[in-house]
Structures are given as structure tokens and as C-alpha cells.
Amino acid sequence: MTLNRVLTGTGTAALAVLALAACGSEGTVGRQQNSVTAQAAATSPSPDTQVAFMEMLERVGAPCVPDTPAAPESDDPGPGEHPPTQPSGLLPVDENPPTDVTSPTATPEQPKLNGVEACEGRIHGNRITQALTGLNKPSTIQVRQELNKLGYTDSRIHGLHAEQGIVRFYVDLRVMGGQLALNGTAAGNKTTVGAFAHPAEGAFNPGK
């Protein structure tokens, strides 16, 4: 069969088949692209979600932030006063300033929460405990939904899994060099949430 016969006899049908095939391919590609986009949106919080998360952290932690400290007193001499003629605290000639060289046998110091972070951790722990305590036989889906309602985004929830009727999870609250994180177990009336320090730098890998 020659190309002319295909075009004159069955050309219309052939072109229709080709057009449908092209549409099917485009539809498949479109669905794949939409699926990839949806997955990316699920794993990467939107800017609005990030802003809402930061606002929640600021609101919850507000009671823990100390008032602005008063301005330090000036070192300038007052009327009739004279500055010391020699600076105080000079090292004797035979002493050397301490060095910051780390001992080869020293071990890395475990991170610790500062006072503000410890206070914030208690507040976050209390509000999450109250939200999860009312769940009867909680599931991972229920725990995630309750955490989301409180403002904790999916990207901050880690290690969520059920084990012997207990749902365990972590919440990463590290921002701006902070080290605050939460470790929680949801088990009805035995729900507990505690705060701990996680290194500020690097990925969130609790327990390692």
C-alpha cells in the first residue's frame, strides 16, 4: 500500500487515531506533572504556611521572652570624677592568655536548652498534650491532624508512627539558631510531650 492510498482512502481515520493518541499522551503527561506538583506541594510548605508557623511560635513563646533590658549605665566619668589612670585586670608579664585549643580526648558537649527555650518547650508541650489527651485510641492520622490544627506544619513533624497502641512523634521547633525540639507519645490519658535540645545545624535526626 502506497502513502497516497493511505492519505486518500483511510487518511481521515488514521489522522483521527493519531490525534487521539497524541491527546492521550498529553493527558498522561499532564497527570504525571500534576502528581509531581502535588507531591512537591505536600513536602514543601508554602510561604503563607511558613509565615503562619513563625507567627504561632512567636505567639506561644511570648510569655517566655524577658522584657527589654534597661540601658547599661554609662562608663563615662561624672562631674568631679576621673577615670582610672591604669586599666585594671592586666595579666602579669609572666602569664599567657588562655588558648581555645580543644583537647584531643575531649568529647562533643551535648546541646542544652537555654532558659527561654525551656520555657517555650513547656508551653508547647502543654498545649499539645491537652489536644492529644482527648483522643481515644489515637492513630497517626489523628495525631498529625491535631498537630496541624495547633499550627505545627507537616515539614516539622518527624518520626510519626504507631507502636503497640502508642503514637510516637517528634516536632522540630528549631528556628534562627535555636535548639528546641519536642518528643511526644499519644496514648489517650497517658499522653506525654517533653522538650529537648537538638543541634541547631544540620538535618533533624533525633536520637543520633
Image (cartoon, rainbow, N blue to C red):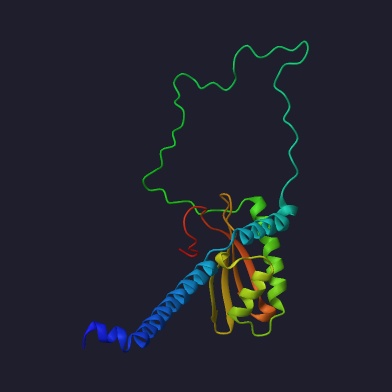
Quadrant hosting residue 136: bottom right
- Image point (40%, 80%), residue name: 19
Question: What residue is rendered at 64% in x and 75% in y?
Answer: 145
Q: How many marks?
A: 0
Q: Is residue 161 above or below residue 55?
A: below
Q: Is residue 197 left or right of residue 136?
A: left
The residue lying furthest to the right in this view is 79
Percent of width and height locating residue 162: 55, 80
Q: Position of residue 184 (x, y in %)?
A: 60, 70
Residue 104 lies, with reference to residue 6, above or below; the image says above
Toward the left, the furthest residue is 1
Task: Give coordinates of residue 169: x percent, y percent.
Answer: 57, 71
Residue displayed at 67% across by 78% down: 190
The reply to whether residue 186 is in sight is no
| Foreground of the two, 180 or 48 | 48
On screen, residue 146 above or below 14: above
- Whether residue 184 appears in this view of the structure is yes
Q: Quadrant of the N terminus?
A: bottom left
Q: Is residue 149 left or right of residue 102?
A: right
x%, y% of residue 46?
59, 62
| Picture quadrant where residue 104 is located | top left
Using the image as rendered, state which of residue 206 and residue 158 is in the foreground. Answer: 158
Q: Quadrant of the C terminus?
A: bottom left
